[in-house]
Amino acid sequence: MAQLVLLPGKDRSLARRHPWIFAAAVEKLSGRARPGDTVDVVAANGRPLAKAAWSPESKIRARVWTFDPDEIVDDAFFKRHIQAAVERRQQTPELRGQDGLRLVHGESDGLPGLIADRYGDTIVLQLTATGPEKWRQAIIHALQRATGCARIYERSDSHVRRLEGLLPVTGWVSGAAPAERLCIVENGVRMQVDVVAGHKTGFYLDQRDNRLLTRTLAADRATLNGFCYTGGFSLQALAGGARSVLSIDSSGPALATAIDNLALNPQLDANRAEWREADVFTELRALKNAGQHFDLIILDPPKFAPSASHAERAARAYRDINAFAFRLLNRGGLLMSYSCSGGISSEHFQRIVADAALDAGRGARILRRLAAPPDHPVALHFSEGEYLKGLLCQVD
Ligand code: SAH
């Protein structure tokens, strides 16, 4: 096996169990390795440190599979680690009865570059790095074994694959497309999941708990859901007895699915829902100019800052939409505001929302800090990365 030799002093982050080895930490590769091959990682003095997947084209030159230099990375490795990730979900009481959940969350489950989401009897697999790409078959078998699901769809079309020199791969890798559209029930609400053409793996599972929270807050409130996608927050707000729910998204197909989703839930009062295909920035301004007000506003925008280099422009965008939301709220109104930008920390996000309240001339307080549910654990040694953060604020 080839050896990845680190520069002197560059083993510190590895000693802290951070799984990424950046190009700048690497002295050399002794021996030959193809992309995705497992290499022995050694300190400058030759001390064995880890086994990692080699990725010559990425700035993250290797991702650690195991910090035990004696552990063997083979089919059985994936069987063990995927089984363990699935069992962690089974042992989490809050996840019982959920038929849409994330089974494997990459680095947080010790499996860098591997995402597996379960929607009913279907698994959606996303491989984002050379390591899991090499072990695709072992991963598929391990997922089948750990879950009993025969149907697996691969959605390896995330743009981050390009950084690894990988082309997009999509398609059924096990079983065939279901005859009917795939549906899950999320806390009492039926939702379609389009694993082929939907965003990400088809659904934003990371907002499950926050959608449920919305339901508990929505009673009698005039509600606005910006960036509604397929209507997850909107339908939970209706389930919670919202007086009205105006939902905005710029994607026609997402709104069409949202409208279908409402029809799948005859228990909800469809007369209270209004859907609008529009740009949230423009529409919030228009609503303000029209003198409209709301009691509950949800803002769950796409990632404005994928990395720190975009943070400044993204901060402006977050500040603008949040300032408009504060202006649109009635006294005592609630704002649920989210960011999934890796380039913006939760402290930074709080400052942005605070500035937005000032822009709007509103006093407000944080009632709750909002995060992703337990099937989206956070790798302890990461900075905030991709992780979802949010604030529930109440205005005076
Ligand atoms: N809250 C949703 C997920 C939101 S994802 C849920 O719980 O499922 C972000 C959504 O924002 C996407 O549906 C995307 O189509 C939409 N979007 C992106 N930019 C937008 C813009 N400028 N105006 C309106 N919608 C936008």
Image: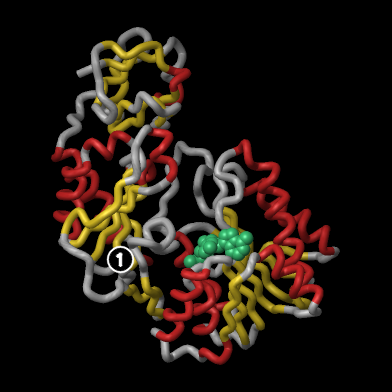
Q: Secondary structure at mark 1?
A: strand
Position of the C terminus, as image quadrant, is: bottom right
Colour setup of the view: secondary structure
Q: Is residue 213 above or below residue 55?
A: below
Measured as percent of width and height from the top left, residue 135 is found at: 21, 39
Residue at the spot 45% in from the left edge and 60% down from the top edge:
206
Residue underneath mark 1: 119
Question: In the shown orientation, is residue 373 left or right of residue 371?
Answer: left
Question: In the shown orientation, is residue 264 left or right of residue 177?
Answer: right
Measured as percent of width and height from the top left, residue 13 is found at: 45, 25
Place residue 176 in its image quadrant.
bottom left
Residue at the spot 38% in from the left edge and 62% down from the top edge:
197
Total numbered labels placed on residues in the image: 1
Residue at the spot 43% in from the left edge and 86% down from the top edge:
263
Measured as percent of width and height from the top left, residue 39 is found at: 26, 22
* Residue nearest the observer in this picture, 330 or 9: 330
Place residue 199 in its image quadrant.
bottom left
Measured as percent of width and height from the top left, residue 352 is found at: 72, 52
Q: Is residue 125 above or below residue 233?
A: above
Position of the N terminus, as image quadrant, is: top left
* Residue nearest the observer in this picture, 292 or 294: 292
Q: Among all residues in the image, which is located at the extreme top?
A: 45
Task: Classify the position of ligand 1 by quadrant: top left, top right, bottom left or bottom right.
Answer: bottom right
Question: In the shown orientation, is residue 279 left or right of residue 342?
Answer: right
Whether the residue under disc 1 has CB within 8 Å of ligand 1: no
User: Label 1 crowding class (10 Å Cα cut-off): few <14, some 14-19, many 20+?
Assistant: many
Residue at the spot 31% in from the left edge and 58% down from the top edge:
89
Residue 389 visible in rendering? yes
* Residue nearest the observer in this picture, 287 or 83: 287
Q: Amino acid at mark 1?
A: Tyr
Residue 369 visible in rendering? no
